[in-house]
Image (cartoon, rainbow, N blue to C red):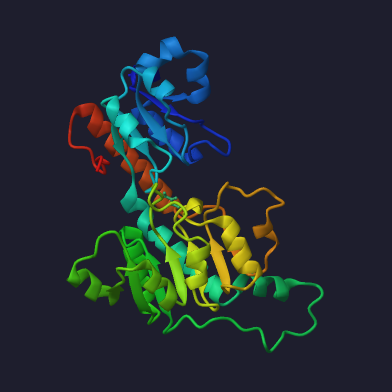
Amino acid sequence: MGDQDLPGVLVSDLEGPHGICEDHAEDLKRHFNLITMQDFLENKAQLGPKIQAVYIWGGRPAVSQELLCSLPSLKIVASAGAGLDHLDLGLVASFGVKVANTPHAVSSPTADLGMALLLAAARRVVEGHQLAVSPHTENFPTDYMGQQVTGATLGIIGMGSIGYKIAQRARAFEMKIVYHNRKRRKLEEEEAVGAIYCERLDDLLQSSDFVMLAVSLTPQTQGLIGKRELRLMKPTAILVNIGRGLLVDQDALVEALQTRLIKAAALDVTYPEPLPRDHPLLELKNIILTPHIGSATHQARRQMMENLVESILASFSGLPIPNEVLLK
Ligand SMILES: O=C(O)C(=O)CO
């Protein structure tokens, strides 16, 4: 079968910063005729009817009403990662189109990164590296102190699969774990990681040495951590965000870090991404920033691609779709 006979799948780009992973393209091309957004836009009338799936990588391409209207054969929107805040699920469903994502592929690497940020912020690893390599360093200070992780209390906000994997890792650090979630976990799941449910977010904020945001961004969670919540946290507390930037009121966070209302923050996600180069968060010493790399391991990214292929192929064959996202 020639490329043109394979089912059409829309991707943002094949290369560049917004492209799909380079080494994935060859695998994808064995199953699909990959059509880039640019090719589609240049020839909508001919290519639109051929496209049966949209492959979202790094949140792109954006799926708008206009796009959905120009894809009459579309069966599925397959989105890499766990977060779905870039998609209007109701809109997609109204076109009779299915949605799938890859929550299982990303949960372990994202939890690993959450722990890496927690440890790095607690022990001031990035600042320490800068000190150790600086040409101006003559002696190592004896008072270069961090926060102890072992035995500290970790408050996890969002106890889905990522939050739960963080709890599993934190247990190995002998941390006390409290969590806040829309729905309480089963007793045996709580006991397996020694996690205590906090019905009130305020109680978690007041008692935690580390607060980990592992919750999805929804209209209900946007701005979850604002001025009031930051004030409730301990002055020695560290905030880690591996969810989405908009979970936190960023201006309030800047102020809290500048005035030492809290000790430090470690963020894999901000808004926008990247931050403008003159953003006040970039000036602070008590912050660690990473460029949204929760799922960025070769293994996870390959599994994400393979999971998307499985979901797309299942939708074409009318089979149950692995990782289908159902409207709540
Ligand atoms: O899976 C996601 O949605 C992520 O953003 C991982 O970092």
**Residue 180 falls left or right of residue 190:** right
Q: Residue furthest bottom?
A: 142
- Please report the residue visible at 51 percent of the width from the left and 31 percent of the height from the top: 14
- Please report the residue visible at 24 percent of the width from the left and 40 percent of the height from the top: 326
* Residue 60, position as x, y percentages in the image: 47, 35
Residue 152 makes an appearance in the image: yes
* Residue 70, position as x, y percentages in the image: 39, 17
Q: Residue 216 or 259: which is nearer the viewer?
A: 259
Q: Is residue 55 above or below residue 7?
A: below
Q: Is residue 49 above or below residue 273?
A: above
**Residue 312 falls left or right of residue 26:** left
Residue 97 makes an appearance in the image: no
Number of marks: 0
**Residue 314 falls left or right of residue 178:** left
Q: Looking at the rendering, in which quadrant would you find the N terminus? A: top left
> What is the quadrant of residue 125 in the picture?
bottom right
- Please report the residue visible at 37 percent of the width from the left and 45 percent of the height from the top: 304
Q: Residue 256 or 194: which is nearer the viewer?
A: 256
> What is the quadrant of residue 97 in the picture?
top left
Q: Is residue 119 above or below residue 157?
A: below
**Residue 179 falls left or right of residue 226:** left
Q: Is residue 60 above or below residue 112?
A: above
- Please report the residue visible at 23 percent of the width from the left and 75 percent of the height from the top: 191
* Residue 69, position as x, y percentages in the image: 37, 18
Q: Residue furthest front?
A: 228
Q: Looking at the rendering, in which quadrant would you find the C terminus? A: top left
> What is the quadrant of residue 145 in the picture?
bottom right
